[in-house]
Structure formats: C-alpha cells, structure tokens
Image (spheres, rainbow, N blue to C red):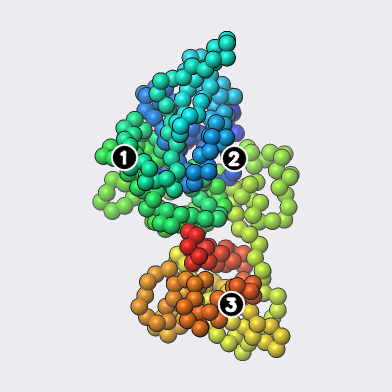
Amino acid sequence: MISKNKYYSLTNILKKEAQYNIIFGQRSNGKTYAVKKYGLEKYIKTGEQMAYIRRQDIDLKKDKCDSLFSDLEKNGVVSDLTHGEYTNVYYYSSRWYLCYYDEKGERHLDPEPFCFAFSLVSMEHYKSTSYPGITTICFDEFISRNIYLSDEFIVFENVLSTIIRHRTNVKIFMLGNTVNKYCPYFNEMGLKHIRQQKQGTIDLYTYGNTDLKVAVEYTKNTEKSKDSSNVYFSFDNPSLKMITTGSWEIAIYPHCPVKFTPKDIKFIYFIIFNEDILQCEIVITNKENFTFIHPKTTEIKNTDKDIIFSQEYNPLPNYHRKLTKPKSNLERRIAWYFATDNVFYSDNETGEIVRNYLKWSDGDM
C-alpha cells in the first residue's frame, strides 16, 4: 500500500466543506490518486458514483482509460475496499466498472459503473442524459500550459450543470500541476490571491451572500521531492522546478542584450493582462530595433491617449484587444516585433505574462 506520509492526502481540504476543491502543486504527488480513492470509497460505502473529466476526447481514449485505476488495483486498494469481492477495474463505453476474474480467466462485472468519463469538447452530447448517482466530480489536469477551449470555464460549468441538475450533494475536485500561473479559471472564479499563495496552505473563497465556497490548496512538497530520482531533473532550468519542488513552471525568456538610454526609446505602449500592467518600449539605436517589456508598478497616466492592449472592450480609439490580430498600421508595426522575435523581457515572469496574453490573443485560452 502507498505510505500515507509519502503522497498527498485530502484530509485537510475536506475539512473546509467547500463545493469546489482546487488542488494544485508538484507533479505526481498523489493528487489524482487521492481523489480516485475517495470516489471509489464513496461508491463502495454508499453507491454514490464519480465523474472523471478531461479537456479533450483524446484524453479519454481506451488505452489511457484502461489504466486510470491501475494504481488502485496494484496497491490492493480495490480488493481491500471490497473485502476481496472485486480485484480489478474494467473500462467500457466511457464507464469504469469493478470486476474480478475467475479461475478460467472470465471477467465478472459489478452491474453498475462506479465512474463515468466526460470530456469538455463533447459537452453537447451529455445534455440529454441524467446522472443522479454522481456526487464526486474530478476534473484532472485543468491547468494547461498550451491550449484552452474557447470560453472553457462556461463549457466546464455547463458539464457540471448537466451532472448536478438540482442537487446540492456534489463535491467537485479540480486538479492541476503548477505549469501555468495564468490559467483562465483563476480569474473566472475570482481566485485573486492564487499566484501569491504559499505552498502548504489552503485558501477559502466565499461569494457574497451565497453558500458557495471554493477551497484552494497549494500542496506542500511530499517525500517525492526528496526522491533520489530528482537528480535526473537537476538542470539549471526554472521549468523543471515544477517537477522537483512544485514551484510554478516558468520558461527562460530572452533578456535585453544591449544597454540603451531613454533617448533610444521611440515609442511606448502597454499590455494589461489579468491584473498585470506591462510597459512596452520600442527601442531603436544605430544598430538595434526591438521592443523591451517590463512590469509597470504604477497606474497608466494617459489612459485616453496611450496605446493600450487589454482583454477588456473599450470604445476609445487608443485601446486595442488582440495584438496578434492587428487591424491598423500601428498595430501591424507593433505586431511585427513579436512575429520576428525582436522582443526582450526584464525577467522570466514578464515573459510568462506576455506568452499567456499572446495565447489569449490567438484565441487559445
């Protein structure tokens, strides 16, 4: 059996009694294992079922889903919880069933599935179906470093609505690795302090006079972080700290290669993404022509004149939304720097903000 001290436990976050339980941190520290075990225990004790959600259909291919509960099989959890009645899990038609094999190798299934598979991209397919037995929902790997669906949070909420209907006894777990601080779910759910949250803490968010509660746990490092296998990931690359320590993954971005003076700054524009304000300077010297981006720690003074790229709609002519989809000559001139990789950053964190803004601008999040 897996040591209780070596991997993540749901004990602390369940004490918050929240409807949404967001759990993020170090890769492979047992987050998914803990929720799968929790859902299986509930099914065996009460008959209540579980939903397992992923973003894409490809994440629910049979070859992947066949092994989803294999860790609970191999560790003897399935057998222990069912007192030996079942030893294995069988995946068929987007459902997981408990099963056992007799001496002839024939499979015998539990009549009812204990878990159902859902993908966000197939949201429309579920609307006509009822799932009254599901009380545990697990959305795995909800934080992506690459592509989110258009209006993904709304799509996710629609899937939840299809499952939950008019009930109030459903608990939702959203699990993620620390691969992207700028996940759109954080803003959509009003998780204002998540980027500053310390490892090993749980923050609780409430929403006005409603009973809604969202518990957010940034898991502390487990014994895995001391594992000797981490020697394989000890390169001087900040992105790898997500694997070894659970720190947020941040790539290495190009820093300014030359020194320049204020007179070399020919034009200034701004990017506002989420709550971050970035000052972007077009620098032209005798030899160089590039844009340099750094955080702006004060408010923008001339909001009715300065060129501002922002997610928000604003009727003023100096406001623009999507830098990668220019509509004017000025926007095309600015976009040229990004298209030709003539962009430099004051630090990697700034580069990460711009990367996520550009992905949003491209329609990928």
With respect to residue 184, does 84 lie above or below? above
Q: Is residue 163 visible?
A: yes
SS at badge 2 = loop
Residue 128 circle label? 1
Gap between marks 2 and 1, in whole Å?
35 Å
Q: Quadrant of residue 337?
A: bottom right
Q: Residue 299 or 361: which is nearer the viewer?
A: 361
- Which one is in front in this view, the residue at disc 1 or the one at disc 3? 1
Tell me what residue is drawn at x 66 percent, y 51 percent.
240
The disc labelled 3 sits on which kind of residue?
Answer: Trp
Q: Residue 148 or 62: which is nearer the viewer?
A: 62
Q: Is residue 297 visible?
A: no
Measuring from the top left, give residue 126's x and y in whole percent: 36, 41
- Which one is in front in this view, the residue at disc 3 or the one at disc 2? 3
Residue 28 circle label? 2
With respect to residue 358, does 186 lie above or below? above
